[in-house]
Image (cartoon, helix red, strand yellow):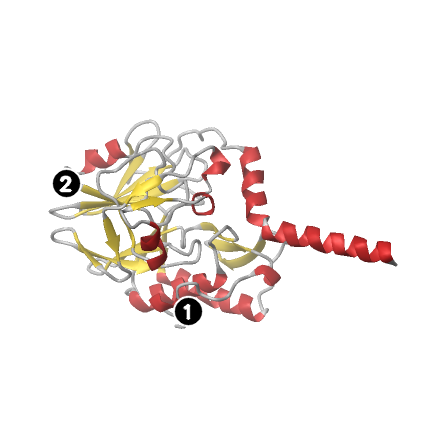
């Protein structure tokens, strides 16, 4: 009997350690795979031009450009949004190639870099920018009293592809909901957690263009990584549905198919919110174990932790509830 009890205790300890360190184990497993080589250049359609043999550029409207990396296996998209006085570069890819010359070829205005979140495939890593703006969450501000924000392992995840977590020199803190005047056009920050607890989207009310980072895009959405949360995803979905025009055009940071920039609509956010409520109630069960895969609609699916590990509390509820 004693041996059986000790064996059961040992098994419970092993399970507990595995659960506690699941994210570390996941990133380690990813690092063993390494980053695949560059994909072949394909036909991107008549609206897209190749800047060089790696980056593409697509005009989405006056002063608005999608900068694609379709040969990188994650097919990242960053966005340059220019007014008459300044421009925003929303995300910067993984930094395998320097995105700055592409941005500078599209505008001669001073450029502010804003990461949608801090994962390695969005911050540019070794690329440095003259002006950086970051969402002004209290926890982030507290970590950077002099504007020096050292990214942590679980925020960055660059170990998976050999990138060290960089230090961001923050020149400007953006409060959720704050307006960003570019001269002749105004963007508004939207706190849209879910993929990470510090994710931000940018909305241009005048055009209805909404740049969503990794919160939503065509393809698998990841809600099982460190800093991901199901309750956060509910909060982000409620915010975007409540504070975006019904005809909004959503541009995400990745795509599942070519050609051109990944575009969705606000109905996709509504579908995501409805699915989250069904997952929370147990009505939508999903498939697989880790990650648990939940079908949402024809455009994307949600990859989450198994139900017993899902976290349904929003971590920053003061910036908006998860209710419609």
Residue at x 52%, y 62% (from the top left corner): 311
The x, y position of residue 212, in whole percent, is 35, 53
Quadrant of image for the C terminus: bottom left
Position of 9 compared to 59: left or right? right
**Camera-side residue: 9 or 44?**
9
Count of labels shown?
A: 2
Which residue of the protein is positioned furthest toward the right in this rendering?
A: 1
Q: Residues within 10 Å of mark 2 (few under 14, many from 20)?
A: some
- Residue 260 in view: no
For disc 1, the marked residue is: 322
The structure residue drawn at horizontal position 62% and vertical position 56%, both measured from the top left corner, is 287
- On-image quarter of the N terminus: bottom right
Q: Which of marks 2 and 1 is nearer the N terminus?
A: 2
Percent position of residue 224, x then y: 52, 53
Viewer can see residue 91: yes
Within-10-Å neighbours for mark 1: few <14, some 14–19, many 20+: some
Q: Which residue lies at the image location 24% right of the left edge and 31% below the top edge? A: 101
Between residue 154 and residue 310, name the one nearer to us.
154
- Judging depth in this view, the residue of 90 and 2 nearest the camera is 2
User: Compared to 65, does 55 lie above or below?
Assistant: above
Report x, y in % for residue 258: 40, 41
- How far across and down, in percent of the image, does residue 159 sit? 48, 37
Residue occupied by mark 2 = 109
């Amino acid at each position: 009997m004693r041996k059986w009890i000790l064996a059961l205790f040992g098994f419970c300890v092993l399970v507990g350690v595995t659960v506690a360190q699941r994210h570390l184990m996941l990133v380690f497993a990813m690092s063993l795979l390494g980053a695949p080589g560059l994909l072949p250049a394909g036909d991107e359609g008549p609206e897209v031009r190749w800047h060089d043999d790696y980056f593409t550029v697509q005009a989405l409207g006056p002063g608005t450009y999608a900068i694609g990396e379709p040969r990188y296996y994650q097919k990242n998209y960053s966005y340059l949004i220019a007014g008459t006085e300044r421009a925003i570069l929303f995300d910067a890819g993984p930094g395998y190639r320097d995105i700055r010359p592409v941005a500078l070829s599209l505008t001669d205005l001073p450029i502010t870099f804003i990461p949608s979140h801090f994962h390695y495939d969005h911050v540019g890593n070794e690329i440095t920018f003259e002006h950086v703006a970051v969402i002004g969450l209290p926890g982030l501000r507290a970590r950077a009293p002099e504007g020096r924000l050292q990214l942590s392992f679980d925020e960055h995840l660059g170990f998976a592809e050999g990138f060290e977590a960089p230090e961001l020199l923050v020149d400007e803190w953006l409060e959720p909901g704050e307006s960003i005047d570019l001269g002749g056009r105004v963007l508004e920050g939207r706190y849209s957690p879910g993929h990470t607890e510090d994710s931000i989207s940018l909305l241009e009310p005048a055009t209805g263009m909404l740049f969503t980072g990794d919160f939503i895009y065509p393809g698998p959405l990841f809600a099982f990584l460190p800093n991901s949360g199901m309750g956060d995803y509910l909060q982000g979905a409620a915010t975007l549905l409540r504070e975006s025009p019904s005809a909004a055009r959503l541009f995400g940071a990745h795509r599942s198919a070519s050609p051109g920039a990944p575009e969705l609509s606000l109905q996709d956010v509504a579908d995501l919110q409805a699915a989250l409520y069904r997952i929370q109630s147990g009505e939508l069960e999903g498939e697989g174990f880790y990650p648990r895969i939940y079908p949402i609609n024809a455009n994307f699916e949600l990859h989450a932790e198994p139900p017993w590990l899902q976290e349904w509390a929003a971590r920053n509820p003061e910036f908006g509830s998860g209710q419609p």
